[in-house]
Image: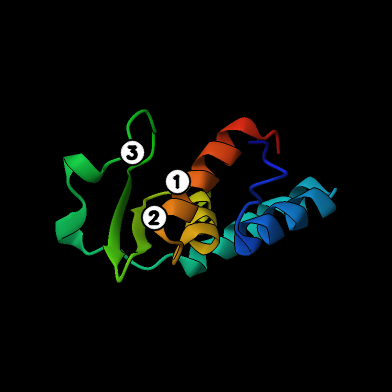
Amino acid sequence: MSSAAKPLPPSLEQIIQRFQQISEPKRRYEYLLWFTKRVPELPEAEAVAENKVPGCVSQVYITAATHNGKVTFQGRSDAQIPKGLVGLLIEGLNGLSLMKFSNSRQILFNRQV
């Protein structure tokens, strides 16, 4: 099925569209940094090797859990850009059902943003 048949979650689509509307690099950067404020803080006890994002120079940790069939994320980073990216993904994907999250992953990996 094409990505047109299975759209991204509205919250993530809105974020992508907003980035596409911003032509000035500095404003894109500022918008990304706005997401740093939206990151639900990951407890220190969760900042362990199995939650660490591999291949990232910064210290980035992300956890995912399901509550009532919905996926929720928490994260932390010691650098602002990765923390903004974590916040962007959390804002765009938190609260999705497992099925919608799985579909969104497939669409994102096949979509050029």
16 or 66: which is nearer to us? Answer: 66
Q: Is residue 55 left or right of residue 6?
A: left
Q: Is residue 68 left or right of residue 46?
A: right
Q: Position of residue 55 (x, y in %)?
A: 37, 28
The label on residue 98 is 2
Q: Is residue 1 above or below residue 21?
A: above
Q: Is residue 38 above or below residue 20?
A: below
Badge 2: how crowded within 10 Å, few (<14), some, or many (20+)? few
Give the quadrant of the N terminus. Answer: top right
Q: Earlier in the sequence, mark 1 or mark 3?
A: 3
Badge 1: how crowded within 10 Å, few (<14), some, or many (20+)? few
Element on which disc 2 rests: helix
**Residue that numbered label 3 is attached to:** 53
Viewer-side label of 3, 2:
2
Q: Is residue 83 visible?
A: no
**Residue that numbered label 1 is attached to:** 102
Residue occupying the far top of the picture? 55
90 or 110: which is nearer to us? Answer: 110
How far apart are the two marked residues, 1 and 3, measured between alpha carbons?
A: 19 Å
Residue 64, by quadrant, is bottom left
- Residue type for callout 1: Ser
Q: Position of residue 73 (x, y in %)?
A: 36, 60
Q: Position of residue 60 (x, y in %)?
A: 35, 45
Element on which disc 1 rests: helix
How far apart are the two marked residues, 3 and 2, measured between alpha carbons?
A: 21 Å
What residue is shown at x 27% (from left), y 41% (from top)?
52
Q: Are marks 1 and 3 in contact (CB under 8 Å)?
A: no
Q: Position of residue 33 (x, y in %)?
A: 59, 58
- Residue type for callout 2: Leu
Q: Are marks 2 and 1 in contact (CB under 8 Å)?
A: yes
